[in-house]
Amino acid sequence: SAIVTGEKTRYGVISQGPDAVRGQADGVPTKTLLEYAEERGLLTGVVSSQSIADATPAANYAHANDRSNWGGIFPQAFAPRFGDGVDVLFGAGRQSIGQQLTAGGESFDGLAAAHDRPIYATLSEAPADNARPVVVADRLDVRAATLRALDILQTSSMGYFLVVEWDAHTDDPREGLQNVVDFDRLIAEVQSRVDQTDTL
C-alpha cells in the first residue's frame, strides 16, 4: 500500500489510511497510482503470479481493512472509484477467491454477468479481441500474461500503467531464486519492447 499510495498504513490494511483497524474498521481510502492513471485516461493493468486479490496486486485497485478478505477485495476491481477501473487483470488464486466469494453470497459468474465482463479461468480462454480481459487462474504463466497485457496496453494513445508481480516467497529456495532469475529476464524482455525515452 505504501508503494502505490505514498502513505504508510497499518499492517494488513490495503490502501486505506492508518485510521483503519485491521479486520474491524475501515480507514480513509488512499488514492493509488493505478487510480491516478485511470483518472487521467491511461490504460491500466495488474499481473501477478499470486492471488490477484493478495496484498500487492490488490493495493492497486482495492481498499480494505484486512488483506485476507479476498472475497471483499476482488469485486472492487469491478467498482472503480476513478475511470473505468483496471483494464487488464491477470492473476492466480481462483479456488481461494472463489470460496470466499461463495461464502459471501457472490460468485465469479455472478460478477461477470453483473458487469458484462467475463472472468476467465485460463489465459488461453480469453479471446484475443477482448480489450479488457480478466483472468483468475489456478496458476498463471507470468511471462505470457505480461506480454499479453503489453499487447493490449500499448495500444493506448494516452499511455499506460502496468504492475507485474512474480512472487519469490517459497519453501523451496531453488524455486524462489529461479523465480527471481525468470523475472529479471522478463524485465529485460519488456524493456526491449517499450519506448525507452518515455517509459519508467
Image (cartoon, helix red, strand yellow):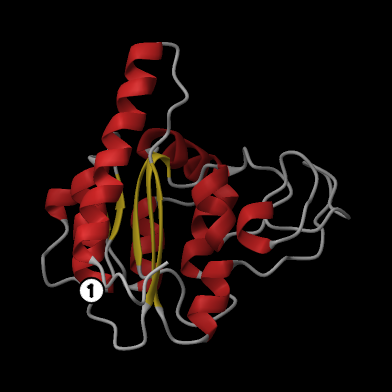
Q: Is residue 151 above or below residue 75?
A: below
Q: Secondary structure at mark 1?
A: loop
Displayed quadrant of residue 51: top left
Q: Is residue 1 visible?
A: no
Query: Mark 1 packing: few (<14 Cα in 10 Å), some, or many (20+)?
Result: some
Quarter of the rendering occupied by the C terminus? bottom left
- Place of residue 113 in the rendered image (x, y in percent of width and height, measured from the top left): 34, 67
Q: Residue at x 50, y 77 (%)?
A: 37
Looking at the image, the residue that sits furthest to the right is 19
Q: Residue at x 61, y 66 (%)?
A: 32
Residue marked by disc 1: 131
Looking at the image, the residue that sits furthest to the front is 197
Q: Is residue 164 above or below residue 178?
A: below
- Place of residue 84 in the rendered image (x, y in percent of width and height, measured from the top left): 45, 80
The amino acid type of the residue labelled 1 equals Ala
Q: Nearer the viewer, residue 197 or 56?
A: 197
Q: Is residue 109 above or below residue 154?
A: above
Q: Is residue 26 visible?
A: yes
Q: Nearer the viewer, residue 81 or 111?
A: 81
Q: Nearer the viewer, residue 10 or 116?
A: 10
Left or right: where 154 falls relative to 40: left
Displayed quadrant of residue 163: bottom left
